[in-house]
Amino acid sequence: MCIRDSNKGTTSTYGVLAATAITNTGATSITGTAGSDMGIHPNDGTSVTNSGTIVHTGSDHFGDAAAGIAKTDLITAYNDLSTPSSTTLSATDITGQTFVPGSYNSGSEISIADAGNITFDAQGDPSAVFIMKAVSTVITGTTSTMTLTGGAQACNVYWQVGSSATLGVNSSFIGHIYAYTSITANTGATIYGQLLARGGAVTLDHNTIVNNNCDAIVTPT
């Protein structure tokens, strides 16, 4: 039960990937051991606003062949998240809940209230995968947070969003967002993962994006 590594394809190196535009306000940074590339497809660099205020060491792929491949890989990865059978969430607001490894589905939106928290508990398995699927939107409140425990890693948390994701002001978000349409990271939001929008724009505002590989798992001999 997980997104297959091969189906991530070239998306794995992108901190931000959009279809129509990338818009940024203020100082935003994209870092991480997995990669800090930015890309747009099918549009090109003319659809990037204030790219000079985004600090990253990765490459820019705006409307080029690499961006086209990444866009195709994004569609594959998005569809791959639909494969595992899922537990239906009892409520759309998941504030205060703890999730063990598995796939979870909301028939509508998924939300976290202002200053709320959710926890991903790997129960001692650092390879454990968490998949959160929303038919419509994902919305996190102002200063909301997410916590990893039991060996859980941000690299193994995935969000499949049926339309758009909106991250609250000064919130902390864990996981890779695969949005069908668009993603908005409001002022000061920190993301431990990726922002990947297959149909629309990614909007940034003084954000920190950290796209790290998983830590190596040591097998006892």
Image (cartoon, rainbow, N blue to C red):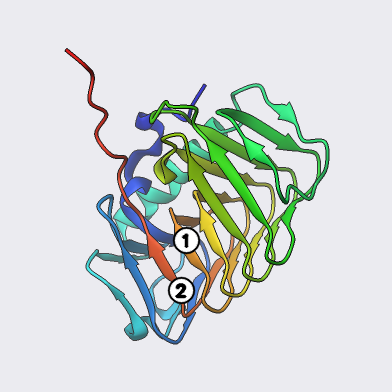
Read off the residue under disc 1: 191
In the image, 94: left or right of 121? right
SS at mark 1 in the image: strand
Of residues 64 and 141, the one nearer the viewer is: 141
Q: Amino acid at mark 1?
A: Ile
Question: Which residue is found at the position 32% from the left and 85% from the top?
Answer: 52
Q: Dot 2: few (<14), some (14–19), or many (≥20) neighbours within 10 Å?
A: many
Of residues 139 and 112, the one nearer the viewer is: 112
Count the marks: how many?
2
Question: Which residue is found at the position 34% from the left and 46% from the top?
Answer: 12
Q: Which mark is residue 143?
A: none
SS at mark 2 in the image: loop
> Whole-percent x and y of residue 130?
54, 34
Of residues 141 and 117, the one nearer the viewer is: 117
**Figure quadrant of residue 111:** bottom right
Q: Are marks 2 and 1 in contact (CB under 8 Å)?
A: yes
User: Residue reaching furthest top?
Assistant: 221
Can the viewer see residue 56 in this picture?
yes
Q: Amino acid at mark 2?
A: Asn
Q: Dot 1: few (<14), some (14–19), or many (≥20) neighbours within 10 Å?
A: many
Question: Which residue is found at the position 63% from the left and 63% from the top?
Answer: 144
> Whole-percent x and y of residue 150?
46, 34
Read off the residue under disc 2: 207
Q: Is residue 159 above or below residue 216?
A: below
In the image, 6: left or right of 168? left
